[in-house]
Amino acid sequence: MLARVYLPPFITALFGGLFVALGILTFGNAYIFDRLFIGVLIFTALICFKNINIVSLLTIILLQRIIEELAWAGLNDSYVAKELVYLLGLVMIYTFRYDPMVKFATPTLLLTIAAEIYWYVSDYPAPEVYWPVLLLLSNLFTRYMIFSRLEFVERYFPKKSQSTNLDWIIYKLTGTTVIIQSLLLLEYIIRHVFELHQLLVMYHSYPYLVHGIAIFAIWATFNESYKQILPRLLKA
């Protein structure tokens, strides 16, 4: 009886502290952190393999990581790459126009395109802002997939689709990331268009913000896995 009452909050606090420590230790080491993230996703999928709702959500998260890794490895700072990213952005903005986060993404994307044109015409050495744009679009895509997940699950696994707490958490975290990417891009534009070189608030805080969000996402994912397995352990 006592285990049922005190064990869940104890495990939550224990692993919460563990992931905070891992976040601090892996800060600045993207290689190790990405492997940690993928490892937690795979572990959670194995624990929850009978829960199609958790597995489908983890698949969406893993797909986002794969897309970003492939984009990082394959894209370069060429005009063709930039044009493709911005064209994709315009298409996605229209496709996801009912997402509340689009009201942040749309003006940011349009201002970024305008800034790129200005830098090109004025022969200014433009910063590589297409990468934050790509991350912004990646998070919009993930939000769309999470929003559509129940429909997909119901189509292939009738009467098994169900919203989970992890859906809501990841949906909110990706929305927060869209806002952060928008603020970062706006700061880039203001700094390089108006030559306000001392404006570095988002530039310096950005690594801490996105790393903190990623650590919280890992903890939330692991937390969901132990919630699935704990009742079986206590019953045993």
Image (cartoon, grey):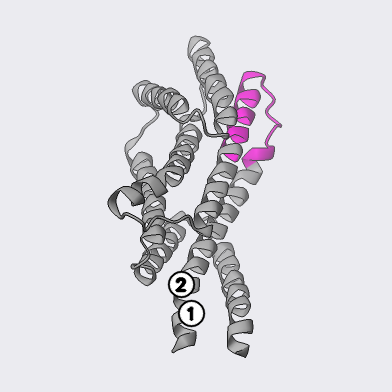
Q: Main secondary structure of the magenta part?
A: helix
Is residue 129 visible from the viewing direction of this image? yes
Mark 1 surroundings within 10 Å by alpha-carbon count, few (fewer than 14), some (14 through 19), many (20 or more): few
Are dots 1 and 2 in contact, CB under 8 Å?
yes
Q: Which is nearer the eye, 193 or 215?
A: 215
- When the figure is inspected, residue 54 is found, relative to residue 137, above or below; the finding is below
- When the figure is inspected, residue 175 is found, relative to residue 163, above or below; the finding is above
Badge 2 is on which residue? 228
Q: Residue furthest front?
A: 159
Q: Residue furthest left?
A: 156
Question: Magenta part of the protein: which range?
Answer: 180-203
Badge 1 is on which residue? 231
Residue 222's x, y, as percent? Answer: 49, 67
Residue 198: within the magenta? yes
Q: Which is nearer the eye, 160 or 229?
A: 160
Mark 2 surroundings within 10 Å by alpha-carbon count, few (fewer than 14), some (14 through 19), many (20 or more): some
Q: Which is nearer the eye, 65 or 120?
A: 65
Residue 115's x, y, as percent? Answer: 55, 18
Residue at 52% over, 24% down = 109
Quadrant housing the N terminus: bottom right
SS at badge 2: helix
Residue at 53% over, 62% down = 220
Residue 196's x, y, as percent? Answer: 69, 25
Q: Amino acid at mark 2?
A: Gln
Residue 175: within the magenta? no
Report the Cα–Cα distance between label 1 and label 2.
7 Å
Quadrant housing the C terminus: bottom left
Q: Amino acid at mark 1?
A: Pro
